[in-house]
Amino acid sequence: MDEIFKALADDSRRRLLDSLNARNGQSLRELCSGLDMARQSVSKHLAVLEAANLVTSVRRGREKLHYLNAEPINAIADRWISQYDRERVNALADLKLALEATSMGSDAFAYSTYIRTTPQKLWQGLTDPAFTRRYWGVEFDTDWKPGSTMTWTERGASIAHPDQVVLESEPYRRLSYTWHTFTAEWAKSAGVSEEVLARLAAEKRSKVTFELEPVGEMVKLTVVQDRFESDSTLREMIQHGWPALLSSLKTLLETGEPLPAPEPDRHDS
């Protein structure tokens, strides 16, 4: 927690976060150009932000792209701030919302968290229905082999489609799959209107990737979701849910109990 507040205390680092908030997934070169800051200074500030887990970097070819990571702020809100009067911490609540916001022009977002567990246990937490239903409310039916189809079950609605598949599967290291198909049955169970369902069904399928990296007695979990269209309805609906979901997964693996489930959203617009 100290690292988070120290990282946010510097105006230059806040400017970097503002830049990523305006346009997520920037390279070092793009950040330097947009902020008129020396490359060395930007690199040093990014290192501090990454150490505080406020920025997540993902390699794409020769470039390293940088993304805002709201999970630490979300964890503070869920595990500490919630014990006190919300009116006294409006500034931090506003910061949490600001860090979760992703530019409408970006086609991806990324979040990271550190979990005191093993890669084997975390992999189980991502794939085993007995785990996923507890913190996510979702169950997967698949053999987790690349190319295999997946059946999602959520709120009693089962979702299957030939294009709903496992893309990559390296046990305890990396997992990637396409996002689920939007059916009328799913929309009814999730409270999604026909208008929103039509917009979702018209969009190309997105992809989610989980990367597991051992760090001492912990595992760094990075989640990247991409392949969104410009002004994606889906991205706007789900991007704010990932920090809370990761916090609940972390709590389940570290304590044996997930965070209390929030009231379900009604996606009517």
Image: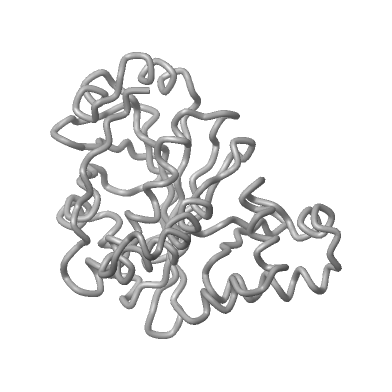
The colour mode here is one colour
x then y, percent, for residue 205: 46, 30
- Quadrant where the C terminus sits is top left
Q: In the picture provided, is 141 more to the left or to the right than 75?
A: left
Is residue 256 shown above or below 246?
Answer: below
Task: Please name the residue shown 42% across and 38% down the image.
Answer: 178
Quarter of the view holding residue 248: bottom left
Is residue 160 shown above or below 264?
Answer: above
x then y, percent, for residue 219: 40, 74
Task: Please name the residue shown 50% across and 26% down the image.
Answer: 204
Which of the two residues, 221 or 104, is positioned nearer the viewer here?
104
Task: Please name the residue shown 32% across and 75% down the image.
Answer: 118
Which of the two residues, 245 or 203, is positioned nearer the viewer here?
245
Q: In the picture provided, is 96 more to the left or to the right than 13?
A: left
Quarter of the view holding residue 255: bottom left
x then y, percent, for residue 145: 35, 48
- Quadrant where the N terminus sits is bottom left
